[in-house]
Amino acid sequence: MTEAIDGIQYVGVGERRIGHIEGIAPGAEYRRRIPLQRAKLHRDNQRGISWLADEDGAEVADAIVLHGGYEDDEDHWTWVRYTGASPDADKYEVNGVKKLLRSQSWAYRDNAALMRSYERGHPIRVIRGWEGDSRYSPIDCYRYDGLYEITEARAAVSRSPAPDGTPVKICQVDLERLPDEFQDPTSIEGRISNLLERQKGLLQEELEPVGSEIEEGTEEEAQQGEKFPETRSAQVQRLVRDAAVTRNVKALYDGECQVCGLRLLGPDGKPYSEGAHIRPLGKPHRGPDVEPNVLCLCPNCHVRLDIGAIVVDDDWSIIVRAAVLGGNVRPKLKRHRKHKIHLDYVRYHRKRWHGELDLSDE
């Protein structure tokens, strides 16, 4: 089955279910809520909590949206503190901040589904919108960011009382992002991963000397050969996430380097640029793969950023720490109005190369 979503053809988009949706990997982005709903990632085009019927018919939560929620919400990428739902009549806003007129209840349909998923250990799909935490929000769209587990559910008291001064109790859950190895590749990615694995095995057979002795490892490991299934899956998954995140950033600048202004064109006339993460991905830095942490750079400036030859100050001035002949840079980093680069990542990068970070606990 092929379905067009936001102008992109998705093969084998599956039915709504608990966990990943077939054919959709973390990092997939959707212009608005209707395409998100059609992709089966969320049941509703307005509400934050999505639910479906479990095997026994009980309603359980399968997804939440982080998009300018209540004032008690917190987003730290790897963990989220999320406030439950209330009828529309119980909500009001002050200066764009959502508040509640009265206390929430775990008996409310959406909240009850969230509690059942906690009790049953069901994973939750987390979707971020552009009005969420500025450190992790996508550019004017919604992004599926993978599976999280609910680690705690509690009744808490909101920061703001009701207009009459009465304390407002809220339904609150904490969620933690599942490790990368549980952010399963889709079936398409899985086939690519298996192909890479088979190619690795064939190459290993060709390079293995006849009658050679193995100095390290067990006999069992020698018989199995060298395999890296987790690494292969992670590489395929990273390609999918990068394709969505960096594509958004590079499109804003039409391939122009934010540091030096160079715009490379290929023989086909299309611009070539690279998406560079300010706070690096993976250990020990654990930077998130999100638009506020990505720059559009030419290959040279990408390398210069990665080796600390350039850093960016809080006023967006570019500081050259190691000059390169012919490698002139702008006085300040070019920024598109829609590209909300976050200073947290810029400061992390600067402290890293100034030797001000302790990465022993990262």
Image: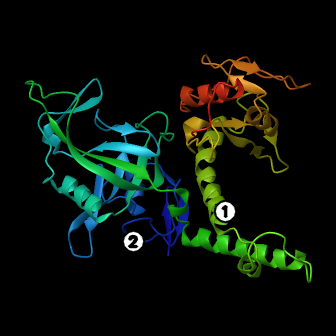
Residue type at tag 2 = Glu
Front disc: 1 or 2: 1
Indicate which disc residue 55 carries.
none
The image quadrant of residue 91 is top left
Picture residue at 51% right of the left edge, 61% below the top: 183
| Circle nearer the N terminus (1, 2) | 2
From the top left corner, tell me how far across and down residue 147 is, in percent: 44, 57
Amino acid at dot 1 = Thr
Q: Is residue 157 above or below residue 17?
A: above
Q: Is residue 34 above or below residue 232?
A: above
| Residue 231 tag number | 1
- SS state under label 2: loop
Say few, some or many: other residues with alpha carbon within 10 Å of mark 1 (under 14 / 14 to 19 / 20 or more). Answer: few
Left or right, 161 with reference to 237 = left
Q: Quadrant of the C terminus?
A: top right
The correct choice, above or below, for 161 with respect to 127 in the image is above
Q: Few, some or many C-alpha atoms within 10 Å of disc 2 (few <14, some 14-19, many ≥20)?
A: few
The answer to whether one can see residue 278 in this image is yes
Pointer 2 residue: 15
Identify which residue, 119 or 41, lies in the foreground. 119
- The total number of labels drawn is 2
